[in-house]
Image: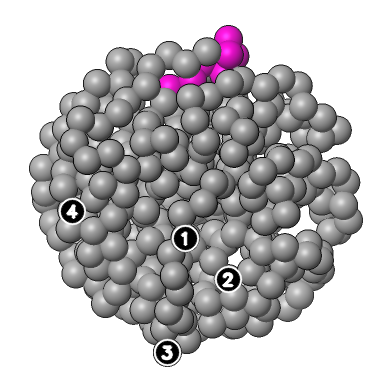
Amino acid sequence: MTRTRAVVVSCLSLALAAGVSAKERDVAKPEGEWPLFRGNPLQTGVAVSALPDRLRVRWKLPTGDAVEGTAAIAGGTVYVGSYDKHIHALDLKTGRSKWKYEGGPFKAPVAWRDGAVYAGDEDGTFHCIDARTGKKRWTFDVGAEVTSGAGFAGDDVLFGAGNEMLYCLTKDGKKKWTFQVAGGPVNATPAIAGGHTFVAGCDSNLHVIDTKTGREVRAVPLNGQVGSTGAVVGSMLYVGTMTNEVQAVDWKNGKIDWSFRAKRRQQPFFASVAVSDDLVIAGSKDKRVYGLDRKTGNEVWSYLTEGRVDSSPVVVGKRVYVGSQDRNLYVLDRDRGSLIQKLELDGEVVGSPAVAGGCLIIGTVKGTVYCLGE
C-alpha cells in the first residue's frame, strides 16, 4: 500500500555544481548510462540518449510504496529506491527484477559508479551495494535521514544529511571530513568540480568547499534561502530559491547576474533547473514550467500544468520532459514550451526522470516504476 505522508515545505541546504575547465565541462556519458541525480556531474539535467517521437509504456513495475527519488541507469540495469525499504535492480529492457536490497525507506536519488550502487535512507544509514549481486559492501551510520544523492571526488564519496552536515567518506566507507551548514538539512546531491563542492541553504549563502580538506574557500551571498540543486555552465550557476526566484550566480566573481520572479502567482522553485544551450528550464510550485533566457533571465515561455511541479525537468534534444503532481508526465517543445505529449501515470510525480538507452525511467507516489520509450 502506498505510504501517505504530509508534505512539509522547509528550508533545505543543497549541494550545487560548478564547472572549471574544458575537460570537466565534457560531461557526456554513454547513451546507456545515467549514473547521477541530474545525469552528469554539473547537474545540468541534459540527456545524451535520444528518445522516440512518441513515448509509450514499455514496462512498469509496482514496488511496495512510493517512489520519489531518481533512478540510476548503468550497464543495462535500472537502480531505484522505494519507500518499501528496498533498492530495486531492474533489467532496462524487460523490467525483470535482478535483485532487491533491504535498508530503510529510500527517497534519495540512487548513484552508480564503478560497479557499486550508493544510496542513503531515511532511517539514517548510507549504503554501498555491489551492483552485480545486490550484496552490501559497507554501510555508514549517519544518525539522521539521508535524502541527498551521492557525488564523487576522486575515490571519495560525498552526500548530505538531515543533521546539517555534508559528509565525505573514503571509498571503504570511513569518514574523512564533514562540513556543517547551520540552520537546515543538506538534502541534495553534491557535485564536484576542480577540487571543490558547493552548498547553499538556510543561511542564504553559497559555500565553496575544498573537497580534500572540507574547508570553506569562500561564501557568496544569495538573495534567499535555497530549496533546489543548482546547475552550472562555465562560471554561471543557475538555481531556484525558496523566495520564489530563479537566480544566475557568477560564482567565480561572487555576484548575482540576474534574478527571475514570476509575474503570476509566486511560489518557491523546489525542483532543480535544467540548462540547455540558451535556456534555463525550471519547474515551480505555482504549477508552471518556465523557459528562461540564459543570458538575461527573461521569460521566453511558460507552460501551466494542473499540479505542483517538484519534478526536475530533463532536456533531451529539442524536448523537455517533466512530471507534475497532477499525475502526468509532460513532453514540451524546448524552444516554445508548447505541449507535444502528455502521459497519465498512476500517481503523483515528484521524482525526476532518468534517461538512458532510449528509455525514460520515472516513478510515482503510488509506487510504480515506469519505463517509457518505443
Q: Secondary structure at mark 1?
A: loop
Q: Residue at x 71, y 20 (%)?
A: 218
Quadrant in the picture for residue 221 = top right
Residue 57 image position (x, y, % from top left):
24, 72
- Mark 1: amino acid: Val
Mark 1 Cα shell of 10 Å, populated few (<14), some (14-19), many (≥20): few
Which quadrant of the rendered structure holds the C terminus? bottom left
What mark, if any, has residue 305 been given in the picture? 4
- Residue beneath disc 3: 1
Residues at discs 3 and 1 in contact (Cβ within 8 Å): no
Q: CA distance from mark 3 to mark 1?
A: 21 Å
Tag in front: 1 or 4: 1
Residue 278 image position (x, y, % from top left):
30, 23
What mark, if any, has residue 8 been given in the picture? 1
Q: Secondary structure at mark 2?
A: loop
Q: Residue at x 58, y 10 (%)?
A: 253
Tag in front: 4 or 2: 4
Q: CA distance from mark 2 to mark 1?
A: 17 Å
Q: Which residues are magenta?
A: 248-254
* Nearer-N-terminus badge (2/1): 1
